[in-house]
Amino acid sequence: MRILGIETSCDDTGAAIYDSEQGLLVNRLASQIELHNQYGGVVPELAARDHIRKLLPLIENLFQDPEIQDRGVDAIAYTAGPGLAGALLVGASVASGLAYAWNVPALPIHHMEGHLLSPMLEETVPEFPFVALLVSGGHTQLVDVEAAGKYRIMGETRDDAAGEAFDKTAKLLGLGYPGGPQIAACAMQGREDRFVFPRPMTRQPGLEFSFSGLKTQVLTTTQKQPRLDTQTIADIALAFELAVVDTLTIKCMRALELSGRKRLIVSGGVGANQRLRDRLRKECEHSGTEVFYPRMEFCTDNGAMIAYAGHYRWQLEMKDDPKLKHHCGYDVRPRWSLEDLSK
Ligand code: KG4
Ligand code: ZN
């Protein structure tokens, strides 16, 4: 089976083709970083308009290979949620239009399931069951994955997602957007002993997160400095990054202990953070846990994970859904819990 995957939930336009026999055939991405950088964050209306401009040329580009063009695809998977409503609607409309024209089903995919499954695009594939740490710009969740499609959220953030905290802190420090890579790069020059920020909610039991207080800590720390020079900014960036990495690590190890699972997968944009990857690898080695990451480009939003999730959902249940075979409109779900997929 061959599936076209379309991702437009936020500020990346992604398109890819996954083949059940041959794996990922082609993967393309158009980033909107420059567009949103001047505003210090994603502007939803601009994001949607840019998806309209970029999506069809990106898909056309996938079909440049004559073999891909001749063979065509058997289904189109698109991100139906969660995400920005206008941005989601662009992907959903294009997917439905093409599905109608090509007479193939259009499969609505949960963006976080795409992230969760992204390590499966790698050579060494994690087996079920496992714990998943999903850390992106919109979500921070620890999910117990008992079997294919069986999700139980063990804990999530009460306020800001980890990626959102990176983005807001970077803005406060005058670093660019998106904040994660900027803070990570800046923190390389930081000195560890100068500032220490708290590890929120790690002293109490449970697996909930809260990152909004950290950015307030950063704000008050910056206000107390007589001069916000480059070195001070790097020192603050490092203290912030260490606090987030430490917090995520403590909660991951706790989730593994509580669930008794011996496998951890980490995905979503913040999963690209090298300090987090190194730290978790070390802790997991220590506790005899296997840890799986997608490669960096599959941590952040991309079409490959949606194409893969489309294939996975098709095999799991969608092939038996008569509604999907008839083109009866489409749905987007800006708010949508991963647990709904287990029902
Ligand atoms: O998964 P993603 O591309 O989009 C959402 O679904 O939200 O995640 C984007 C988030 C942004 O907040 C960005 O700052 C963060 O991931 N991010 C990082 C890194 N690369 C991206 N955070 C920390 N370190 C990184 N290297
Ligand atoms: Zn994402």
Image (cartoon, rainbow, N blue to C red):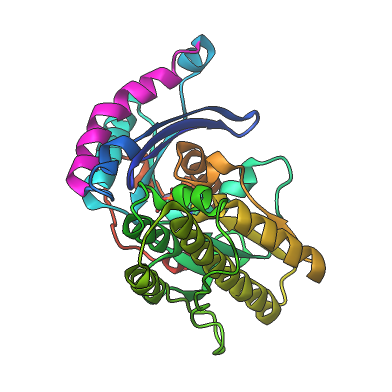
Tell me where residue 202 appears, x and y as whole percent: 55, 82
Tell me where residue 86 appears, x and y as whole percent: 21, 47
Q: Which residue corresponds to the image point at 37% horizontal and 59% vertical from the top-left?
A: 228
Which residue appears farthest toward the front when viewing the image?
Answer: 226
Q: Which residue corresponds to the image point at 36% horizontal and 46% vertical from the top-left?
A: 176
Q: Quadrant of residue 164?
A: bottom left
43 and 131: which is toward the camera: 43
| Residue 51 relative to residue 307: left or right | left
Q: Does residue 130 show up?
A: yes
Q: Which residue corresponds to the image point at 29% horizontal and 30% vertical from the top-left?
A: 100
Q: Quadrant of the C terminus?
A: bottom left
Q: Does residue 110 show up?
A: no
Q: Is residue 313 above or below residue 276?
A: above
Which residue appears farthest toward the bottom when viewing the image?
Answer: 204
Q: Which residue corresponds to the image point at 57% horizontal and 43% vertical from the top-left?
A: 296
Q: Is residue 146 above or below residue 126?
A: below
Whether 156 is among the magenta residues is no
Q: Is residue 279 above or below residue 97?
A: below
Whether 51 is among the magenta residues is yes
Is most of the magenta stretch helix, strand or loop?
helix
Tell me where residue 89 appears, x and y as whole percent: 24, 44
Tell me where residue 330 appears, x and y as whole percent: 26, 46
Report the magenta residues as a range: 44-65
| Residue 62 relative to residue 262: left or right | left
Q: Is residue 41 above or below residue 290?
A: above
How many numbered marks appear?
A: 0
| Residue 204 relative to residue 328: left or right | right
